[in-house]
Every structure is written in structure tokens, then in C-alpha cells.
Amino acid sequence: MFFFNKKPKPAETPTFNKSLCFYFQVHQPYRLSDCSFFNGPEHTNYFDGPQTCRNETVFNKVADKCYIPATEMFLDLVKKNKSLKLTYSLSGVFLEQCEEFGEKGKYVLDLFRELHQTGQVEFLAETYYHSLAFLYSKFEYAEHIKQHSEALKRLFNAKPTVFRNTELIYNNELAE
């Protein structure tokens, strides 16, 4: 039965406690040098050494183009919007390079510290080297996670409560 003379009740709008959380992966691999095992024992530094500074050059370039402007922007955004939440997965190798590569690396670390201090940023646990160690050795894998958590504690006084596996790889054995 329809009653056209009655006004319909306005639909109730549900209220939600809204927040938005972004997730970012930050990893800066070490570049391999041009040395080769076949060049003899004097050429065993497979990672780019201080003589070429290629790793530092790449780090500084990425810091200028990405790490610094993006982190400054997000720092400004979280200060203006208390419902904005950010989650970062900072590999141990990235953190090492921040510590190793002078004032620019220190500045990047300081920006992440300031972000964390807002209370709106969480750091995830992961493998220190952004590795696939789980496929090789469960013991080594656990050590990499422990090493990464210790680095987060030392650098940010952060204790991760969520784990993110390399490349977001999942399997049931790992979940257990």
C-alpha cells in the first residue's frame, strides 16, 4: 500500500571514522662494480667501492629527485591532515646508505624520523637486505628480519608490529 501524502524519511547517512593509509617501499640496492672473478684475486670487490663512488652518486641523485621532495611533501601533508596515515618499508640496505653517505643521507634519515614522530607513520618489518632468504634458509631469513628490526629500533626507536615480505611474496609455510 502506498501513501503519497507522507514525506519519505531521509536516508540516514552512516558515519565512519575515515582514514587513509598509504604504503611505500624504499630500497636502494648496492650496485655491482665492473670487476670480475675471472680477473684474478685482486679484483674481488664485487660491490662498487669508494674509488668509483657510484653507489653514493646514485643515492644522492635519487635522494634529490625522490626521497627528499616526497618525504618533505608527506611530512607537510600529515601535519595538515591528522587522518592521513603512512606506512613505510625501509630496507636495511637503504638505511645503511643513509648512514654511510654523508649529510644528504643524514637529512633523509632525519626526515623519516620527523615523519615517525608525528604518530601517523608506521615502519614495517622486512628482511634487512630485501632478500629472498626464506627460499634458502629459514634460519638466515629469521636473522635478516631480526637485524632489520634492530636497525629500526636503533635509528627510529620503532618496534614494527607488521611484517612485509620481500616483493610481497606469500606462502602458507611463511604465514605459519
Image (cartoon, grey):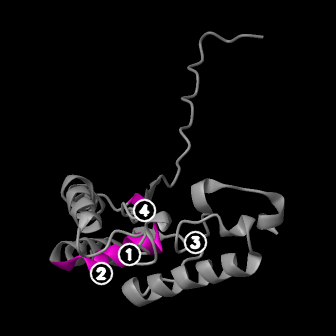
Q: Are marks 4 and 1 in contact (CB under 8 Å)?
A: no
The residue beneath circle 4 is 27
Dot label at residue 95:
1
Q: Earlier in the sequence, mark 2 or mark 4?
A: 4
The residue beneath circle 3 is 127
Q: Are marks 4 and 3 in contact (CB under 8 Å)?
A: no
Q: CA distance from mark 2 to mark 4?
A: 14 Å
The percent coordinates of residue 151 (x first, y second) are: 46, 84
Name the image quarter holding the C terminus: bottom right
- In which quarter of the view is residue 106 placed? bottom left
Name the image quarter holding the N terminus: top right
Q: Earlier in the sequence, mark 1 or mark 3?
A: 1
Q: Earlier in the sequence, mark 3 or mark 2?
A: 2
The percent coordinates of residue 127 (x first, y second) are: 58, 72
- The region drawn magenta spans 83-102
Using the image as rendered, state which of residue 115 and residue 20 is in the foreground.
115
Using the image as rendered, state which of residue 111 and residue 118 is in the foreground.
111
Instruction: Identify the residue shown where x is 26% and y is 54%.
Output: 66
Residue 159 appears left or right of 2: left
Q: State the SS at label 4.
A: loop
Q: State the SS at label 1.
A: helix
The percent coordinates of residue 131 (x first, y second) are: 58, 66
Instruction: Identify the residue shown where x is 43% and y is 72%.
Output: 93
The percent coordinates of residue 95 (x first, y second) are: 38, 75
**Tag 4: Cα neighbours inside 10 Å, few (<14), some, or many (≥20)?**
some
Q: Are marks 2 and 1 in contact (CB under 8 Å)?
A: yes
